[in-house]
Image: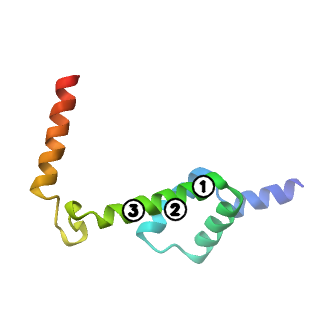
Amino acid sequence: MKIVERLMFLVIPSCRETQKLQSRNLDEKLSLWRRSSLWMHCVMCGWCRRYGKQIKFLNRVCRDLPECGNFEKGEGLSDEAKGRIEKCLCEEKDKG
């Protein structure tokens, strides 16, 4: 049984490694080996499966926000968004 456990450890990444792979997978295409190991881990681990769904959702929402601009084209935040952020930061500073 120990041999099987060791082989599983080599093939299936830990939760920490799986989270890193899920994040990298949003930005770049992973190799077939990495995608397969990521899939195998997520089949067995509900926590990592949920985490993957959450970061995909957040990634999609952030890309769709008009005030975030298109950072890939070099555009930044709108002046309105910058003002809201500055206002929130000043309010937090005044509280503390």
Q: Quadrant of residue 28?
A: bottom left
Contact flag, marks 1 and 2 (Cβ < 8 Å): yes
The relative height of residue 5 versus residue 95 in the rendered view (above or below) is below
Question: Which residue type does callout 3 highlight?
Answer: Asn
Q: Residue 83, how many percent across, how many down?
A: 11, 47
Q: Which residue is mark 2?
A: 22
Identify the residue at image location x=36%, y=62%: 61
Question: Which residue type does callout 2 highlight?
Answer: Gln
For the rendered model, the colour scheme is rainbow
Mark 3: few/some/many CA within 10 Å (<14, 14-19, 20+) = some
User: Of 80 and 16, which appears nearest the observer?
Assistant: 80
Q: Quadrant of the N terminus?
A: bottom right
C-alpha separation, residue under disc 1 versus residue under disc 2: 9 Å
Contact flag, marks 3 and 2 (Cβ < 8 Å): no
Looking at this rendering, what residue extends furthest in the right direction? 1
Identify the residue at image location x=69%, y=63%: 43
Query: Which numbered disc, 1 or 3, marks the residue that appears first in the sequence?
Result: 1
Query: Which numbered disc, 3 or 2, marks the residue that appears first in the sequence?
Result: 2
**Which numbered mark, 3 or 2, is in the foreground of this view?**
3
Q: Which residue is mark 3?
A: 59
In the image: residue 17, left or right of residue 43:
left
Q: Secondary structure at mark 3?
A: helix
The relative height of residue 85 versus residue 94 in the rendered view (above or below) is below
C-alpha separation, residue under disc 3 versus residue under disc 2: 12 Å
